[in-house]
Amino acid sequence: MDDLFIDGLTPPQQVAVQHVDGPALVLAGPGSGKTMVVTRRVARLVHLGIAPWQILALTFTNKAANEMRHRIDALLDDSEIVGSGLTVATFHSFCARLLRRFAESVGLSETFSIYDSSDQREAAKQAVVRAGLDLSNWTPMSALNAISNAKNEMQDATDFSASASDFYTRTIARIYASYEEILRAAGAVDFDDLLLLTAKLLKNNVDVRTELQERFSYVLIDEYQDTNHAQFVIAQTLVEGHRNLFVVGDPDQSIYAWRGADIGNILEFTQHHPSAITVALGQNFRSTGYIVEAAAGLIAQNTSHLPKELFTELGSGQRPQLMATINEESEARRVVEVFRTRHEEQGTPWSEMAVLYRINALTRVLEAAFRESQIPYVIARGTAFYERKEVKDALAYLRVLANPSDDVALKRIVNNPPRGIGATTLNRIEQFALASGCSLYEGMQRVTEVTEVSARSRSAVHRFMQLLGKWQMHLQSQEQTMLLDGPDFADLVEEVIRESGLYELFRSGRTEEDLQRLSNLEELVSAAASFIRPQVVVWSTSPEGHSDESEEGARGLSVTLSSFLESRLD
């Protein structure tokens, strides 16, 4: 049986794949085949007879999670994976679905929204103003960075306020408290909340903790060097009883301390798990000898280091060259010289040369140098699909449909496209809602009570609320009839895009940009049509319960909608 799962692997890879019970640390150097090790180990556990629904594999991106699931499926028979309940997910999507399952326990509604970075900035801006502070002195981004750091250390607003000891931290505590009030009033959480609330739920709720510990008997975590304190607590709590924690990572590839990653989680793994085995994967299958040697030389200088020998069997290859320049202008000129030499003397096409850079600001002097030398170039960057304005506008409509209390999304769409609800009208309704202790959505429903709003504007608000109400009726009418995925779900998305006026706004446009935006909206409908709702995260712990969809299946479309909105966030 093992031949299937260890065929073609190196001896260290075989050790990792064949490990079953107890903690394990796999130090995976760059290009060492760590994804293959993780996926083959999961497949082997299932083949050994371990119920798939008892296995949890966590990583950091949707792309990585999808790749892992695809490889695992390819290694197993259909009979082993159909309806298996195997959970392969990102940390954030796992926590989001878990919080929807136990929403009441953490003081949330099942339909809570998840704020992305732009939503967070808007909420932070409101928080600074409500705290009575000047936005020029207390910028939303600086406040968000401080709040994010606190949440990564598992400090909620109350905890942070209690520990604030100087003017700066006490002021941030005021903004933090206001920010949390805004999020909760909108029925929303941010990315950091997904981890913080899940960690606190596991620590503080005995019933939930026990259920999940029994549910997940084998936990695997990829890129462990990038975990923060909240993720560490989640992992440690899940495996308290069985200690079956298998982590893969490399402290020498840890670059996310700036966003809360704690390298101590991987460096101190064997201290937290004294019985753990350690496997070092040092063979690089991607790079040639000189490159691996250069990387190993740099890594050896790290003060915090877990030893592993890096090597390759792909030959020596070409030596990498290191060039030191005086400043960025000198660097750009040197790059141009190298490119021109390779093009004119060695015949290398311009299209086969590239410059990699860390931040967009670095392109300024490079572009100037290429233009001056008349070298054709293309900047290979762009706005991610779900970050494009027209797509975010359409998603905002869907967010309000899923959660009417989402004030940030509602303010984005209320006059987009224009429908006669100006900023003054919206501000007056918002002030009424704030004074009445209700959401903006409820304030708009009660617009007749806002005496400062003109009759014409009231009519515009009324028509807008009728449109939202129509979609809500559609949503509710389908809930008890069928589970809507794929084409059925896409019908709802297309209906919203067309009836909101977004489709007509760009269809009637004459520019290439309008056509591109229209195409992006059509692509969003296609994404909805091909969307497959993830399996629910929590099942009964009995063998018969591993494919139980009944609890969430009855809520069909709203669950599909929430899952679709979550899927764009990782």
Image: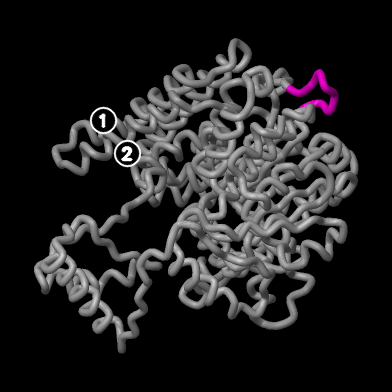
- The three-letter amino acid code for the residue at tag 1 is Glu
Look at the picture and state if 277 lies above or below 564: below
Q: Is residue 178 left or right of residue 337?
A: right
- Which residue is painted at 87% across and 61% down in the image? 274
Count residues near mark 2 (Cα–Cα under 10 Å), then give few for <14, some for 14-19, many for 20+. Answer: some
The foreground one among 159 and 460 is 159
Measured from the top left, where is residue 139 in percent x and y? 50, 71
Viewer-nearest residue: 556 or 372: 372
- In the image, residue 493 above or below residue 155: above
Can residue 256 be seen in this snapshot?
Answer: no
Q: Which residue is mark 2?
A: 417
* Location of residue 161 in the rendering, given as x and y in whole percent from the top left corner: 74, 70
Secondary structure, mark 2, is loop
Disc marking residue 162: none
Q: Residue at x 11, y 74 (%)?
A: 372
Give the mark nearer the N terminus: 1 vs 2.
Answer: 2
- Provide the residue span drawn in magenta: 539-546
